[in-house]
Each structure stands twice: as C-alpha cells, then as structure tokens.
Amino acid sequence: MLTLAQAQTILTTALAHADAAGFKPLAIAILDSRGAPKLVAAQDGTSLKRGEIALGKAHGVVAMGIGSRALHKMALERPYFVEAATHAVGGSLVPVPGGVLIRDAGGALLGAIGISGDTSDNDEAAALAGIAAAGLTGETGA
C-alpha cells in the first residue's frame, strides 16, 4: 500500500526537483493502486486544467498497467485503440510522458503519479525524483 507519508515525500521532492531545475509551475496527482487519489496539488501559477491533465496521466497508467511513455508509443502506433481505451476509462487517460507507475522493491504496484506543467520529459523527471526519494521504483514505460 502507498502510504500518505510516502506520497508526501514524493510530492515534496518532485516539487523541490522542479524548483531547483527552474521548471514551470506543476500540478501533481498521486493515486493509490486502485486509482483513488492520495494527494493532488498544484503550484501557484499553473495554467487552467493542469490538474486534470496530471490526473489523466496518473489514472491512465494505473488503468492500463504501463507507464505513459508506453502509452504514448501505443497512441502513435494504434490511435484507435488508445481512443477506445480513453473512452472506456471515462476520458481520464493522457498518453504522454509524465505518468509513472510507483512500485515497491519487490515490483508490487503501489500507485501512480501524474505531473503536468512543464515539458513531458521534465514532468517525468520530477516524478522519478520524488519516487526515488521515497525509496520506491518508478516505471515510465520506456
């Protein structure tokens, strides 16, 4: 189970990483393995709907069981499938990097994080920094 303390560490470290690197303001959504929200936050100055995009990245990777880099590749290769999957999960699937599965040392799925606000690569880097700080493993789908 992803604990609140772990989710707080992930959030705090992801934001610190982004601030140190000079990223644009981020919205972050952390979900447990069921897809239920654990933490959702948006920095001051995020653009409209960034929170929903972050949730879509996190929800999509939990729903599909793969990191968002793999979802992005799938969207390019099989756009009709990803469109259908997006519909099947209620529209909350954003197939671009920045959605990362969170696993424990044994590989068990604990949850997911979605970040939106900067480039997709930078969103993903912030997510991975947070996950590593919590002593967990991130799966990007690369």
Image (spheres, helix red, strand yellow):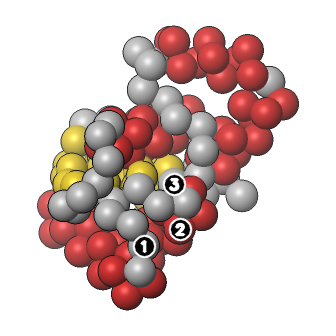
Residue 122's label in the rendered image is 2
Residue at image position (51%, 54%) is 98
Q: Nearer the viewer, mark 3 or mark 2?
A: 2
N-terminal of the two: label 2 or label 1?
A: 1
CA distance separating discs 3 and 2: 8 Å
- Give the crowd class for mark 3: few <14, some 14-19, many >=20 residues within 10 Å: many
Judging by the rendered image, the residue that carries numbered circle 1 is 23
Q: Nearer the viewer, mark 1 or mark 3?
A: 1
Q: Please identify the residue farthest to the right as the structure is shown.
A: 77
User: In the shown orientation, is residue 125 left or right of residue 42?
Assistant: right
Disc 2 and disc 1 in contact, CB within 8 angstroms: yes
Residue at image position (55%, 60%) is 119
Question: What amino acid type should be assigned to the residue bearing mark 2?
Answer: Asn
N-terminal of the two: label 3 or label 2?
A: 3
Residue 80 position, x and y percent, is 73, 14
State the quadrant of the C terminus. bottom right
CA distance separating discs 1 and 3: 13 Å
Give the secondary structure at mark 2: helix
